[in-house]
Image: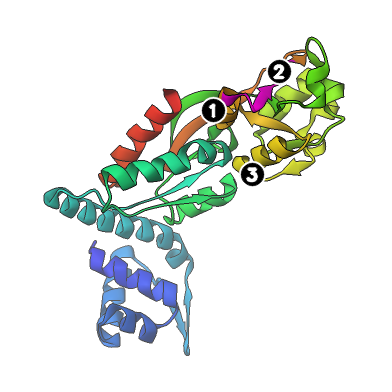
Amino acid sequence: MNLKHLSHWLALAETGSFSRAAEKLHITQSALSRSIQVLEEELGGPLVDRIGKKNELTPLGLSVLERARRIVHEAQELKQGAALLQEGGLGSLRVGLGSGPGAMLMTPWLCHMAEHHPTVQVSVSRGATELQLLQLRERQLDALVVDVRRVAMAPDLRMEHVVEMRAGFLCRQGHPLLRRTGPVPFDAMLAFPIASTPLSQEVVRIMVDHYGPRANPAQMATLQCEDIASLIDVVRQTDAVFLGIMGAAREGLADGSLVELTLDPPFRAGARLGLVTLAGRTELPVMAVFRAFVKTQLID
């Protein structure tokens, strides 16, 4: 099967028009028609129904579409990667970071690349894990670092476990809760706003099992967003209490401006951070740089 024919088919499927597809490919309509016809003969059936000026994908065409897109993309990435290796280049990288990883990795990663690989194009996006998974599958992102407990296992995903990060509750130095002696009762903490990122169902289950229905973050958390840095800033300035991974607040904990709360009963939960990529996708050399950086930054 010819990759050129598959590329022609993708252009037709994406534009819905022989004329627009031919223009996009810089070939004649007759050449495009012949290419599609050859592919249809190889696959044993029509890929598109030509109804007047409209072109609709047949059931066979729909079934072929995703596989063809994957094959063509893989071939393009393989060619690009081989060329970069020959030239000694690293390529470019687009990564998505979950709330916790974003707080710990985004600025250090950008600084690392600016210092050690200043000519390499990198971009970092933040957002909900579900949206970033969609962007990964559509090849708008090359890799994610997220809490893998929020990612359903799937054959098209490769998940590499990096580290377990302990979660907990913290507040600002001078918070009213710190006037108590000994552990803080869970109910006493609920008298204050709770700031949290979205949590995995596993953490939700642990909390409800441990503290009862009132600990369900869907009801308990009054301040929610994906940006941990913003939540921690709110905690520094108000009596809000932060619920999340402690690693994201390590600077505040180190300088004493933030204090981890010891609860009664003790809180035991965390996040399982990992690297998520598309299974079988050809990686550019810069991906090895990112993988090593993530492991070093999160484990050390």
Viewer-side label of 3, 1: 3
Rendering quarter of residue 22: bottom left
Residue 33 in the image: above or below residue 295: below
Per the rendered image, the range of residues in magenta is 255-262
Residue 139 at x, y percent in the picture: 41, 55
Residue 249 at x, y percent in the picture: 59, 30
| Helix, strand or loop status at disc 3 | helix
Q: Which residue is mark 3?
A: 230
Kind of residue at disc 2: Phe
Task: Give the crowd class for mark 1: few <14, some 14-19, many >=20 residues within 10 Å.
Answer: some
- The answer to whether residue 263 of the structure is visible from this angle is yes
Label annotation for residue 272: 1
- Separation of marks 3 and 1 at Cα, in angstroms: 22 Å
- From this viewpoint, which residue is outermost toward the bottom? 52
Q: Which residue is mark 2?
A: 267
Task: Give the crowd class for mark 2: few <14, some 14-19, many >=20 residues within 10 Å.
Answer: some
